[in-house]
Image (cartoon, rainbow, N blue to C red):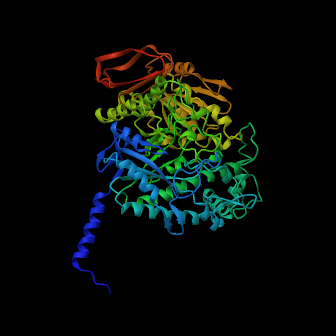
């Protein structure tokens, strides 16, 4: 037996203690009515910087703005994140063989950051799709294609979950014992198409028996082992739990809503499809929490129901994920209607995320006039002809670019969430004008006290059904017609809150004067009763379904047959008639909340904002008090501009 001397034991204990002291404790807590980021017991600005091609000169610029929170990616596998475009890999793979790992890319990324910013805190986005060698060794745990081939992982495979989980544990253990532990604050678990927990298109029709068995188990749970109820729901007296097959979700697109009496099989398939991804997110977040003894933040992309309307992508189970105790934050890019004069909301019901105590971190991958192309920055990664046009190009001028970033900032501040500035290929924000916006956003958060802003709380509540797209046989075209109301909503001159249908019992309805049930194809008996109760309280209820829009109020009910999309002027009239306070009538994009106010304007000119209370008004950019007490704000705006004001109710 080997003998250990006291001095050796002491050294080991001291080393272990030094590691424990070096590790950060990162968590999400409620403050001023919203989830907020805390690092080592201190409130921390929830703004970060990320780039796929991180370079020291850009990290240095960001550190000089006062931001010290960074994200960078790491990849278990050796294949690109977009299996359609054919994009190459951004890093060398971590998982090089069975129980063999190469952490060199993680070391390189850390060194780039900490050499220019010793105060750095880092969230690593770990992409869990497997390497090719693993897929070849494990066809039973891979997606099985109709032609007999395989493709990456089967999301229903416990083997893939187990083995990938062990790799994730090894990564975290290595990080915890490394010199980089004192910089690490979180793990963003990622998988699937573009790292966003979408199914890759080839995975839509996964023929792996593991998936079929998981589907049958899921059906038993949904129908409580009641086979008669199951057969009745599917309209098939011959089907059984032991023989049921997933529906065909690769059939041709048809422009219609599904028939619930004949197509429940397909709808169940979509629900299982979505919940499978959520179960994986929960599984890997739990591993992060348990392996780090609860010290690391956990997050993921998920819940894009407000924009991604193709149900095959798998984003229809946010309600389930929000109940996960191991998850701290969620994220999405902003909606990709990236034109001036329009709102780019997050792709999710923000207020439901916050209601469940989760932090929202927007991925502000905002294109600017100095946005670079992948083919110029990393030609070895760029597939020919891809990432060169359309959404990959920014505006032509710096004025528009600056207004875009201010708009991002205004939305985050008024809604009480954070985000990262996603400099995809590097250099997108590398100008004094743009870096100033990033710096000021961070300063605003730190300099002005967190405020719930109860006097400017939303009086409009929008409730959406994340499973609307399950019923859309056009793979999202019909659902998008309804959800496109997101754009005029931002121009009504007031704010709105957005919740999931599944959260209706927890919504604080007494603060609202209008409730819009957007995309409810049918109303349940309970929902109809709720409408009557809301009407009795004087709340105006709008219901938009597949046949049109109904308005219920105390005086009379009205119906707009075939009216699915309303204009901002139509909505403003409904809101005003219901007693909603309209701050501005200009039709500009307008955000207000938490003692912040933001206007984004294409044409500029004089803007008159009417407040429902007397307030001190501050121009925070120049730190100028515009008025010590006023109910009316008059400002002149340039075209292609955005302004943010601090409004402190008296």
Q: Is residue 383 visible?
A: yes
Residue 149 drawn at (x, y percent): 72, 60
Outermost residue toward the top in this view: 606
Percent across and percent down for residue 180 are 36, 56
* Residue 526 visible to an observer of this rendering: no
Q: Is residue 78 above or below residue 479?
A: below
As drawn, is 60 to the left or to the right of 557? left
Quadrant of the rendered structure where residue 387 is? top right
Residue situated in front as seen by the camera: 199 or 178? 178
For image coordinates 31% across by 84% down, the residue present is 2
Q: Quadrant of the N terminus?
A: bottom left
549 or 638: which is nearer to us? 638
User: Within the image, what quadrant is residue 326 found in?
Assistant: bottom left
Percent coordinates x, y for residue 452 in the rendering:
35, 34
Choose between 57 and 493: the one closer to the eye. Answer: 57
Q: Is residue 398 left or right of residue 305?
A: left
In terms of image quadrants, where is residue 610? top left
Does residue 597 lie above or below 48 as drawn? above
- Compared with 121, 645 (above or below) is above
Q: From this viewpoint, which residue is outermost toward the bottom?
A: 1
Q: Residue at x 50, y 67 (%)?
A: 100
Q: Is residue 385 left or right of residue 3?
A: right
* Residue 353 image point, x, y percent: 46, 43
Is residue 87 or residue 71 the one in the foreground? Answer: 87
Rendered-image quadrant of the C terminus: top left
Label tally: 0
């Amino acid at each position: 037996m080997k003998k250990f001397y006291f001095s050796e034991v002491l050294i080991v204990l001291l080393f272990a203690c030094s590691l424990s002291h070096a590790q950060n404790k990162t968590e999400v807590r409620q403050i001023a009515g919203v989830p907020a980021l805390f690092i080592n017991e201190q409130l921390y600005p929830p703004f970060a910087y990320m780039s796929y091609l991180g370079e020291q000169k850009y990290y240095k610029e960001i550190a000089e703005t006062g931001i010290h929170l960074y994200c960078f990616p790491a990849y278990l596998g050796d294949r690109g994140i977009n299996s359609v475009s054919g994009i190459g890999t951004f890093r060398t793979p971590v998982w090089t063989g069975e129980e063999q790992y190469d952490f060199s890319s993680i070391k390189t990324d850390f060194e780039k950051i900490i050499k220019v910013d010793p105060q750095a805190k880092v969230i690593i986005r770990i992409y869990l799709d497997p390497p090719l060698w693993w897929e070849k060794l494990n066809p039973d745990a891979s997606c099985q294609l109709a032609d007999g081939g395989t493709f990456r992982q089967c999301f229903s495979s416990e083997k893939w979950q187990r083995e990938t989980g062990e790799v994730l544990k090894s990564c975290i253990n290595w990080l915890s014992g490394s010199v980089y532990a004192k910089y690490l604050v979180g793990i963003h678990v990622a998988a699937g198409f573009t790292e966003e927990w979408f199914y890759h298109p080839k995975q839509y029709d996964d023929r792996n028996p593991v998936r079929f068995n998981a589907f049958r188990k899921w059906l038993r749970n949904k129908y409580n082992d009641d086979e008669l109820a199951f057969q009745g729901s599917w309209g098939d007296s011959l089907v059984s739990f032991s023989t049921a097959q997933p529906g065909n979700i690769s059939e041709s697109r048809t422009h219609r809503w599904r028939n619930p009496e004949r197509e429940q099989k397909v709808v169940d398939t979509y629900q299982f499809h979505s919940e499978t991804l959520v179960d994986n997110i929960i599984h890997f977040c739990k591993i992060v929490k348990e392996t780090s003894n609860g010290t690391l933040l956990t997050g993921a992309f998920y819940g894009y129901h407000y924009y991604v309307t193709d149900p095959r992508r798998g984003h229809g189970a946010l309600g389930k994920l929000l109940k996960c105790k191991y998850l701290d934050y969620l994220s999405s890019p902003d909606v990709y209607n990236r034109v001036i004069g329009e709102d780019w909301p997050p792709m999710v019901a923000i207020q439901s995320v916050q209601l469940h105590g989760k932090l929202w971190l927007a991925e502000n991958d905002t294109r600017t006039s100095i946005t670079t192309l992948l083919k110029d920055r990393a030609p070895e990664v760029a597939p020919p002809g891809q990432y060169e046009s359309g959404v990959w190009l920014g505006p032509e001028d710096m004025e528009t670019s600056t207004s875009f970033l201010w708009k991002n900032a205004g939305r985050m501040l008024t809604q009480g969430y954070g985000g990262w500035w996603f400099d995809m290929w590097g250099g997108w924000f590398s100008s004094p004008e743009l870096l100033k916006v990033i710096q000021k956003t961070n300063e605003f958060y730190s300099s002005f006290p967190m405020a719930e802003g109860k006097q400017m709380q939303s009086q409009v509540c929008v409730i959406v059904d994340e499973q609307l797209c399950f019923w859309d046989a056009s793979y999202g075209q019909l659902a998008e017609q309804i959800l496109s109301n997101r754009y005029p909503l931002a121009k009504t001159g007031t704010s709105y809150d957005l919740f999931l249908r599944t959260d209706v019992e927890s919504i604080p309805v007494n603060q609202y004067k209008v409730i819009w049930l957007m995309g409810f194809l049918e109303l349940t008996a309970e929902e109809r009763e709720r409408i009557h109760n809301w009407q009795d309280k004087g709340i105006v209820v709008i219901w938009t379904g597949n046949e049109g829009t109904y308005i219920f109020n105390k005086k009379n009910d009205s119906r707009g047959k075939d009216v699915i999309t309303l204009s901002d002027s139509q909505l403003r009239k409904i809101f005003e008639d219901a007693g909603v306070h309209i701050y501005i009538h200009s039709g500009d994009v307008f955000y207000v909340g938490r003692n912040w106010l933001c206007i984004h304007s294409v044409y500029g000119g004089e803007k008159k904002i009417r407040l429902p209370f007397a307030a001190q008004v501050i121009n925070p950019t120049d730190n100028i008090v515009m008025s010590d007490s006023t109910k009316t704000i008059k400002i002149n705006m340039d075209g292609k501009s955005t302004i943010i004001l601090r409004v402190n109710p008296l």
